[in-house]
Each structure stands twice: as structure tokens, then as C-alpha cells.
Amino acid sequence: MTLTTERLLLRQWRAADREPFAEMNADPVVMRHFPSRLTRAQSDAMADQKEAAVAEQGWGLWAVEIKDTGDFAGFIGLQAVPAYLSFAPAIEIGWRLGARFHGVGYATEGARDVRAYAFEVLGLPGLVSMTSALNTNSRRVMEKLGMTHDPAEDFDYPTDPPDWSGRRHVLYRLAA
């Protein structure tokens, strides 16, 4: 399954995506709202997992390609919420883009198509999205998607280091 927007192609992962994905996951700007940057091995393992999910389910966290240039930009899509989170089971809509692709509306554009796919094709009853409470840019994307935040559902991400400043997370929800 491939999704196409005005400027983006959300597609299956390719071997050529590994290098720019690893660079993105090692970038302190991109990873500022995560407890640590990823090594090349960790990044490759993550790409393998995302590629396998798309192949098995027909959906997942798709690789994002800029249509005009063919550049790999990151990922946008859907994934199951880890079972250890209190609001599981749920499907999360999420994204991560390289720094040079920030601030031009790609996350919102791609996520809008993913939202439509989730509700109109998959028939999901709702979506969630979460991020560090400090990540105002991702929170803005969630709000542009029509998602709502209930501060009573904020939580400390259980696998983050207890002393990390970004451990507090916000949860946004959207019903179909």
C-alpha cells in the first residue's frame, strides 16, 4: 500500500533509506525530544521493523519520499501502541522527519492522508498520538489533525530514564 499526497509519497521502505534514516536518527535536532540518539545498528533495526510491519499488515510507519526530488524525508503512519502503556490497545498515528523537512507542513500533510486511510479504509474507531510534553511542534500537528488533549491522561513514559527532562508525555485522541 502506498499513499500519495500533493507533495509526498508514503511507501514501503527501501535499502537506500537506511543511510538517510540513520543520519536522521543521529541528528541532535531531530532527536531532541527523545532520551538519546540512535546508533546505526539501532536505526537499521528500527527500519527493518517498520518495513516488516508494512509488508505484513499493508500499513504501518511508511517511509516518506518527497515527490519532486525523490529524497527520503522520514516516516509517517500508524503503529500499535506498546502493551505496557495504560491506554493500550490503541493505534497511534506518528511521524519523524529529517530536520531539513521541518516547518514546511509535510508532517501535517502526510498525517492527514494517514488519518483518512485509518478511518475510511481500515475502519479504525479512533487514533491516539503521544509525544514529550516539550514537543510543541508535534503537538501542533496533532491539533491540526483535530486531535484533543486531556491533561488528566498525561503520563511519564515508562521506558524513559527517570531523570530525563522529556519523560513527561502528552496523549492526544481522535475518534473516527
Image (cartoon, rainbow, N blue to C red):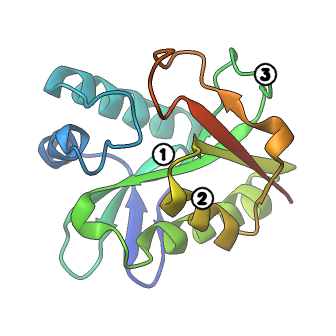
Comparing labels 2 and 1, the label whose residue is closer to the camera: 2
Q: Amino acid at mark 3?
A: Ser
- Give the residue at mark 1: 61
The answer to whether marks 2 and 3 mark residues whose Cβ atoms lie closer than 8 Å is no
**Structural crowding at the residue carrying mark 2, measured as other residues with C-alpha within 10 Å and reported as few (<14), some (14–19) or many (≥20):** many
Q: Secondary structure at mark 1?
A: strand
Residue at the image position 18 percent from the left and 25 percent from the top: 39
Q: Amino acid at mark 2?
A: Arg
| Rendered location of residue 138, percent (x, y) | 53, 58
How many marks the image carries: the answer is 3
- Is residue 156 toward the left or the right of residue 95 in the image? right
The answer to whether marks 3 and 1 mark residues whose Cβ atoms lie closer than 8 Å is no
- Is residue 65 toward the left or the right of residue 18 in the image? right
Query: Is residue 124 visible to the viewer in this orientation of the structure?
Result: no
| Rendered location of residue 1, percent (x, y) | 51, 55
Q: Earlier in the sequence, mark 3 or mark 1?
A: 1
**Structural crowding at the residue carrying mark 3, measured as other residues with C-alpha within 10 Å and reported as few (<14), some (14–19) or many (≥20):** few
**Structural crowding at the residue carrying mark 1, measured as other residues with C-alpha within 10 Å and reported as few (<14), some (14–19) or many (≥20):** many
Numbered badge on residue 86: 3
Q: Is residue 89 above or below residue 61?
A: above
- Give the residue at mark 2: 139
Query: Is residue 79 visible to the viewer in this orientation of the structure?
Result: yes
Residue at the image position 29 percent from the left and 23 percent from the top: 45
Residue 111 found in image quarter:
bottom right
* Cα gap from disc 2 to disc 3, whole angstroms: 20 Å
* Cα gap from disc 2 to disc 1, whole angstroms: 18 Å
| Rendered location of residue 159, percent (x, y) | 52, 15
